[in-house]
Amino acid sequence: MGDSDVARASTRRRRATFAAVRSASLLPANGKSAAGYQSSLPAGISSFNGHGKPDCAPETVGSVSKSEKRKRRSDTGDRLSCHKTQESLLSSASGYNNYRGILNWCVVMLVLSNARLFLENLLRYGVLVDPIKVISLFVNDPYSWPAACLLIVSNIFIVVALYTERQLSKGSFSEVLGFLVHCTNLTIMLTFPAAVVLLVPSMTPVGGAFILGTYTILFLKLYSYKDVNRWCRELSTVKAKKLTRSLSCPSAQHPREVNVCYPGNLTIKDMYYFVFAPTLCYELNFPRSPEIRMSFLLWRLCEMMFFTQLLVGLTQQWMIPIIQSSMKPLEDMDLSRMTERLLRLAVPNHLLWLVFFYCFFHSSMNFSAELLRFGDRQFYKDWWNSETVTYFWQNWNIPVHKWCLRHFYKPLLRKGFSKIVSQSAVFFLSAFFHEYLVSVPLRMFRLWAFMGMMAQLPLAWIVSTFLHGNYGNAAVWISLIIGQPFAVLMYVHDYYVLNYRQETDTHTQI
Ligand SMILES: CC(C)(COP(=O)(O)OP(=O)(O)OC[C@H]1O[C@@H](n2cnc3c(N)ncnc32)[C@H](O)[C@@H]1OP(=O)(O)O)[C@@H](O)C(=O)NCCC(=O)NCCS
């Protein structure tokens, strides 16, 4: 082998392992095994072609091209040196980050372990899924439909808000009177359905939670409607003073769309578009998608139906038996068994929450957005990568976060309140609504949801101060996986103790 070949071989020593493996794989191409090929080499360093003949020998077969010869020479060089300075893949210094296979392994393990849980559950309890029984969760008495009646009544509040805004735009109502009417309307919106849920015996907890959820969404929407129309009036006044174009009527984003200007937006059609649109923040001219994509719409509809059934099935088959078997340890204050039940509940509870997230924030919101050609589809961001609790609350429920920022947090900051006071106020408001949506339908006040929400502030501080990167992300996941079933167990336990003590006792004895 010439000097140049030696030099080329030493250069190639620095090549990646992949290249070495690739060249090694070329060795047996002549029909010999690698070992056999190795043994055919004469002692000493010399370059050979694949047939064990010296390189300098004239080619007997003209078919062996120059590039092939070069390749074989490089193979020989690679065979001489197979090491280089490098880190093990699992060392962080290696810079390696492709863990796709590990992720697949996690998924396989998850499926296998849950399949075992699923089988165990089936063997122990039999099939408990009963879609017909779900109706009884909404209706106690077939002749009394209080939740449906409340749904119809909610239109009155919508019409009152629209009427008030129209009077304000015409100047028939003063700003103070308009504000008072809006405040009264919004207060009744929260108190009236709560009173019905508390006082009407035929209202079930699920029906109550559904209707209070609907009224809460409407409350937030009408609050936003009131604010935005007031801002438009303020802008009109500024415009009148400065004789400039009103910002309440921005130019059209789509050539086919005709933009609405204040007070042209104060119509029944505009109001109901907002009521059904998947947003809590009102705007005179929402961004619109060009057309309804039928396949997208049908796909979301199928997802909604499938995931709703899955939610019902998982609750009946997996959640309820665990909750029922947790009552006794909770009553006896048996700490170790309580912890075991809590951890047992954590898995189905978390799975349900994830399915709910996808079903609500992706399937149903996209469905209504597609149907209404509502353009802004950012209903959630990548909350699953949250390394801080703050990031989680900024990204998991974008409609609520947007409303909080626009109508509560920023107005407080503008009024001169500090950031921490404003954040605490937002979490206080959120805690109030969480408690309202749980305690009223269950007809008992325990403040678990309220405390859970308020605990987010110190938790956010602890996580951001002491845990970073993947540790922060793990802390957010743990708080979600453990925190929720803890609150669920507390409420369900208190509810069972209040309503079904006898029934629970017989279940636990079994
Ligand atoms: C409290 C909360 C609103 C804080 O949000 P945040 O994004 O951390 O707030 P920040 O301090 O980073 O500021 C956000 C915005 O206010 C603006 N801002 C900051 N100081 C300001 C000031 N003095 N005046 C006006 N705006 C200000 C920022 O520029 C930023 O604007 P941008 O969004 O346009 O970028 C948020 O944590 C939250 O939504 N919490 C409740 C969530 C909840 O309960 N969800 C229920 C889901 S079930």
Image (spheres, rainbow, N blue to C red):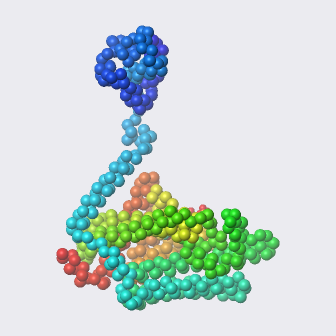
Q: Does residue 49 appear in this view?
A: yes
Q: In this view of the protein, which residue sits in the foreground, 159 or 502? A: 159
For the point 40% across and 67% down, the residue is 307
For the point 40% across and 29% down, the residue is 22
Establish if 465 lies above or below 274. Answer: above
Q: The C terminus appears in which quarter of the rendering?
A: bottom left
| Residue at the extreme top | 57
Taking the image as four quarters, which one is ligand 1 found in? bottom right
Q: Is residue 483 left or right of residue 283?
A: left
Return the x and y of residue 351 as percentages of the image width and height: 36, 64
For the point 45% across and 26% down, the residue is 14
Establish if 220 lies above or below 11. Answer: below
Establish if 33 lies above or below 438. Answer: above
Q: Does residue 401 appear in this view?
A: no
Q: In this view of the protein, which residue sits in the foreground, 430 or 65? A: 65
For the point 45% across and 88% down, the residue is 195
Q: Quadrant of residue 81?
A: top left
Return the x and y of residue 259 as percentages of the image width and height: 69, 70
| Residue at the extreme left | 510
Establish if 100 lies above or below 42. Answer: below
The count of marks equals 0
Q: The N terminus appears in which quarter of the rendering?
A: top left
Return the x and y of residue 184 as percentages of the image width and height: 58, 87
Q: Quadrant of residue 202?
A: bottom left
Q: In this view of the protein, which residue sits in the foreground, 369 or 125? A: 369
Q: Is residue 327 left or right of residue 432?
A: left
Q: Is residue 486 left or right of residue 268?
A: left
Q: Quadrant of residue 96?
A: top left
Q: In this view of the protein, which residue sits in the foreground, 128 or 412? A: 128
Return the x and y of residue 278 as percentages of the image width and height: 54, 70
